[in-house]
Amino acid sequence: MKQFICNIIIQFESIYHHFLFFIYAGFETSKHACCGQGPFNGVGLCTPASNLCPNRDLYAFWDPFHPSERANRLIVDKFMTGTTDYMHPYNLSTLIALDSRT
């Protein structure tokens, strides 16, 4: 979906492709959070009383709500330089380059 408002392109990315990407990016799991309580570490926020994973880089999610730092870096990389499978019609690097010409 895109809308043109005063020469601004509003662009939405495909979350579906990001989750598929997690499967192939070497994450141990996207089912369990690295830090939390309860089933799948999916209850509550990360607190001193939480279970903590031994290596956060192997988890797609830090807590039940937030992607891990590694997952965020991968997502930002796709926003900035990804193909149209991730960002359509342009990635952000292309938009910035187009904007710099105006």
Image (cartoon, rainbow, N blue to C red):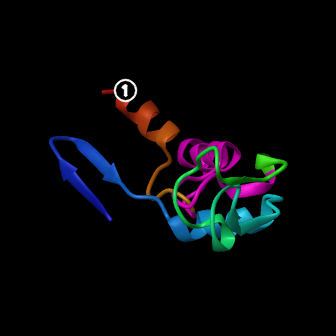
Rendering coords of residue 74 (x, y %): 66, 48
From the image, which quarter does the N terminus lie in?
bottom left
Q: Which residue is located at x 61 percent, y 62 percent?
A: 18
Please give the name of the residue rendered at 52% of the width and 65% of the height, measured from the top-left corner.
Answer: 15
Hey, which quadrant is residue 16 in on the image?
bottom right
Q: Is residue 59 magenta?
A: yes
Residue sitting at x 59%, y 55%: 63
Secondary structure beneath dot 1 equals loop
Q: Quadrant of the C terminus?
A: top left
Q: Nearer the viewer, residue 9 or 58?
A: 58
Q: Residue furthest front?
A: 49
User: Does residue 60 show up magenta in the picture?
Assistant: yes
Residue pointed to by mark 1: 101
Q: Is residue 17 left or right of residue 60?
A: left
**Three-letter amino acid code of the residue under disc 1:** Arg
Image location (x, y in percent) of residue 71: 66, 50
Which residue appears at 65% of the width and 74% of the height? 39
Residue 62, position as x, y percentages in the image: 64, 52
**Range drawn in magenta:** 58-85
